[in-house]
């Protein structure tokens, strides 16, 4: 998944919305988002809305946890998993 389109979109979104658009900021797939204060609960809600609206993936409430939002790599894996799951 590294370098895939979803990863790039999420990285760009977080940089633009939660890092004041500072494209020189250190942010990659493994940056610990909550530990560094880049993400918080409100930012997570906004990211979930972005994922739903821009990527077409509605993340179920039972998948919203610290492990799935630890870094961009885990968020990308979550999006791929939810997108591939059959609709219930």
Image (cartoon, helix red, strand yellow):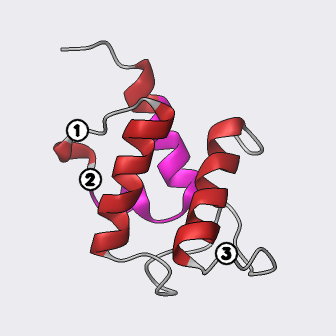
Judged by depth in the image, the label closer to the viewer, 2 or 3, is 3
What is the crowding at mark 3: few (fewer than 14 residues within 10 Å), some, or many (at least 20)? Answer: few
Residue 39 % position (x, y): 43, 75
Residue with the mark numbered 3? 21
The answer to which quarter of the image holds residue 87 is: top left
Q: Which residue is mark 2?
A: 64
Assess whether residue 75 is covered by the magenta stretch: yes
- x%, y% of residue 21? 67, 75
- Residue at label 1? 60
Identify the secondary structure beneath mark 1: loop
Q: Nearer the viewer, residue 47 or 78?
A: 47
Pointer 1 with pointer 2, Cβ within 8 A: yes
Is the residue marked by circle 2 packed among few (<14), some (14-19), or many (20+) residues within 10 Å?
Answer: some
**Label 1: how many Cα within 10 Å (few below 14, some 14–19, many 20+):** few
Frontmost residue, 27 versus 30: 27
Q: Residue at x 77, y 74 (%)?
A: 23
- Label 2: state its secondary structure: loop
Q: Is residue 57 above or below residue 27?
A: above
1 or 3: mark nearer the eye? 3
């Amino acid at each position: 998944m590294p370098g895939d389109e979803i990863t790039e979109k999420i990285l760009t979104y977080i940089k633009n919305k939660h890092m004041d658009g500072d494209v020189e900021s250190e942010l990659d797939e493994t940056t610990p988002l909550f530990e560094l204060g880049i993400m918080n609960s409100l930012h997570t809600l906004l990211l979930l809305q972005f994922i739903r609206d821009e990527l077409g993936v509605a993340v179920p409430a039972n998948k919203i946890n610290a492990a799935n939002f630890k870094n961009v790599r885990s968020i990308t894996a979550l999006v791929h998993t939810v997108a591939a799951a059959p609709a219930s």
